[in-house]
Image (spheres, coloured by chain):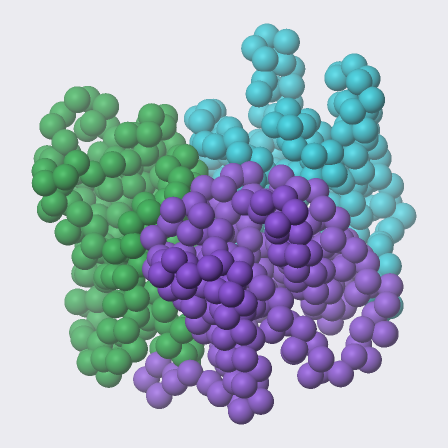
Chain colours: A purple, B green, C cyan
Amino acid sequence: MLRPKADALLLALDFAGTFLFAIEGGMAAARGHLDLLGAAVLAFATALGGGIIRDVLIGAIPPNSIRDWRYASIAFAGAATAFFFHSVVQELPASLLVLLDAAGLSLFAVAGAEKALNFEIHPLIAILMGGITGVGGGTIRDLLLAQVPTVLRADVYATAALAGAAVVVLGLKMKLPRAPVAIAGAIVCFFLRMVSVWLHWNLPKVGG
Amino acid sequence: MLRPKADALLLALDFAGTFLFAIEGGMAAARGHLDLLGAAVLAFATALGGGIIRDVLIGAIPPNSIRDWRYASIAFAGAATAFFFHSVVQELPASLLVLLDAAGLSLFAVAGAEKALNFEIHPLIAILMGGITGVGGGTIRDLLLAQVPTVLRADVYATAALAGAAVVVLGLKMKLPRAPVAIAGAIVCFFLRMVSVWLHWNLPKVGG
Amino acid sequence: MLRPKADALLLALDFAGTFLFAIEGGMAAARGHLDLLGAAVLAFATALGGGIIRDVLIGAIPPNSIRDWRYASIAFAGAATAFFFHSVVQELPASLLVLLDAAGLSLFAVAGAEKALNFEIHPLIAILMGGITGVGGGTIRDLLLAQVPTVLRADVYATAALAGAAVVVLGLKMKLPRAPVAIAGAIVCFFLRMVSVWLHWNLPKVGG
């Protein structure tokens, strides 16, 4: 999907998001007292699971991260980082981790929505695909740890991903230029997520 | 797969089943004290998860509910109904909900088996695909709630779906006309399910 | 993927591995006090889940076990065996079960890696596909039982599958003859697994 050269920056950002989410997966393995292999599995699932689900659903098979070996390598590098520098990573301030996670979420949501549109998926479904790209990996990670996925319980997280994806889909459907649209979508997702964390926003509960 | 016009009724029934299963997903979200987004996720998974698994397995990619935006819209309408009319839905008699659920199960099992045959899947596997279409969504919903899927524990549920699918596959393989075969399959599934509920039937346990 | 005649032995071994893993799935159903349908579901998932995930990811759709009805039949035969001869199977010495499981793991890991290479998947990813083929089914089974997959917790299990797959990928990339390479990969996986059980090997824990 990525045009060589022109999209070198986008690819770099995609790799950065993969690495970050992989570190989160590796840290979840640490909290669950798993071994190095478990860290690699959770890093792979967290970083690449959302994109794999999206690719299977939109018909981009084999998925990007199976086709291109660099994604898995970066995921395992993230796992190794979380494993061998565990005490360092754990010392990072929580607010920095939330901020980096929001950055990764934004990137994945924007890239997921754009890729779905490239595969001629209906705009409404393309927004969903952006959301799934953003939160799918964390959901698989939580399932593997036999936990109710935080996306089902938590504050504005998937909602931020969907909002960012919606901006991208609307902008591209209005034939606006690609780069500003992607940046606007990422900013919307990022700020919605960060503001909701700072203000402890939550969506209303069913029956509540 | 659906021929225009001729299958308008079948499409309407498919949409009805989707809406019903989506309401069930939304109600599961209510029981788990999830927010509106969680209700939408569970409604989507419950209503469309079984068909998506079937479509990926038989090679109908992108799956029907990704290709056609109306399925997701109906699923979200079901989630919104369960969310905003929660107290009304909760007042419905349990026997009505079981009956509607059995109707949805029958429809999905029949449609799933027929679609698999259309994709030239072996009859035995087509029966399985009917069963997966019927119970796959509820299974994903239960997994997302970190529960052992009720299909593994419960009384005659998947068995009814498989029986209905088997009737469809046998009938179509015997070149019987399509509409009566589908109706017969749905009736077998529906009554097997309802009778099992009324009589508290259960399959024998392993080692029991 | 299998060439007729020449690969009759490989096919027989694949069926044997399927049957064995299906019995394990059926036994897990017994431990969870599930019914016959539950045993069939867990047997199917355990025996065929890993291969199905691999096939979807590498683009071999419909997956082998959906395309060829014999796999599902063998899985259900395994479920029935575990169900109806439950007391006999339970009497088998644990060491025999571990040995048979290691044999199945070896076979699946080797076959999975080789198939991924046949689909022109990058060697690194082909090794992963071998590992997923070996452990994916058991992981789905554990998820269905709402348990943290043993592959995340346990001793050298996925690692053995990955090692066997790596031998196959390296050997085939070095243009070594296919049969000895497959046998070498299976032996590496089998012995690594058995030795780790005997010596109670475990990988180091994150942060441990």
Compare residues A138 and B34 and report the one nearer the observer: A138
Q: Residue furthest top?
A: C5
Quarter of the figure with residue A175: bottom left
Q: Is residue C128 left or right of residue B157?
A: right
Q: Identify the image quadrant of the N terminus of chain C.
A: top right
Q: Is residue B34 left or right of residue C123?
A: left
- Residue B100, how many percent across, how many down? 19, 61
Q: Is residue B79 left or right of residue C150?
A: left
Q: Residue furthest bottom?
A: A199
Q: Is residue C52 visible?
A: no
Which residue is at 34% across, 65% downward? B43
**Figure check: C32 above or below A90:** above
Q: Is residue C44 visible?
A: yes
Quarter of the figure with residue B94: bottom left
Quarter of the figure with residue B98: bottom left
**Figure check: C170 above or below B83:** above
Which residue is at 66% across, 52% downward? A8
Which residue is at 63% across, 9% downward? C6
- Residue B89, how many percent across, how many down? 22, 76
**Figure check: B108 above or below B139:** above
Q: Identify the image quadrant of the C terminus of chain C.
A: bottom right
- Residue B158, how many percent across, how many down? 34, 48
Which residue is at 38% across, 53% downward? B49
